[in-house]
Image: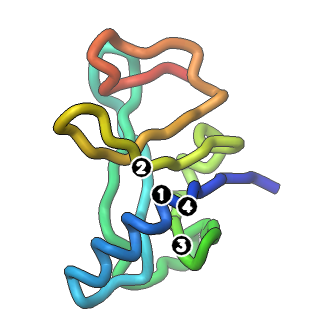
């Protein structure tokens, strides 16, 4: 069974964004071929469930993962961080073998 950990900071941000939108079930995560290293994360809102979604929940927040991304994300941690003026979701993914210098894409 795949695992995906959601930190309290990520859960709080998911709640905040969904409250601002006034709708949604959680965060939707998938991956796509992109960048110089192979894949990049794709984030969207999950406004409804899809039959093949894999749902992870922690701290009252849900993350829905596309089935083709589950293996690549297995064991990852979804966090929400602030670095200087930037705030973003960060994936601490133990499956990543390499990533590009800008951090936008990765190889598994």
Circle on res. 8: 4
Quadrant where the N terminus is found in the figure: bottom right
- Label 3 belongs to which residue? 62
Q: Are marks 2 and 1 in contact (CB under 8 Å)?
A: yes
- Crowd band around label 3 with a 10 angstrom C-alpha radius: few (<14), some (14–19), many (20+): some
Circle on res. 9: 1
Q: Helix or strand or loop: what does disc 1 sit on? A: helix
Could you tell me residue 9's position as x and y percent?
48, 57
Q: Helix or strand or loop: what does disc 4 sit on? A: helix
Could you tell me residue 12's position as x and y percent?
44, 68
Q: Are marks 1 and 4 in contact (CB under 8 Å)?
A: yes
Q: Quadrant of residue 44?
A: bottom left
Residue farthest along the front direction in this orientation: 84
Could you tell me residue 59's position as x and y percent?
61, 72
Between label 1 and label 3, give the one nearer the viewer.
1
Residue name at image x 52 percent, y 66 percent: 63
Q: Are marks 1 and 3 in contact (CB under 8 Å)?
A: no
Q: Are marks 3 and 2 in contact (CB under 8 Å)?
A: no
């Amino acid at each position: 069974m795949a695992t995906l950990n959601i930190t309290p900071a990520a859960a709080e941000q998911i709640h905040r964004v969904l409250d601002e939108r006034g709708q949604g079930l959680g965060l939707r995560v998938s991956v796509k071929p992109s960048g110089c290293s192979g894949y990049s994360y794709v984030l969207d809102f999950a406004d409804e469930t899809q039959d093949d979604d894999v749902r992870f929940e922690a701290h009252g927040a849900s993350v829905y993962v596309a089935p083709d991304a589950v293996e690549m994300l297995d064991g990852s941690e979804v966090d929400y961080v602030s670095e200087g003026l930037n705030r973003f979701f960060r994936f601490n993914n133990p499956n990543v073998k390499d990533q590009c210098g800008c951090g936008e894409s990765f190889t598994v």
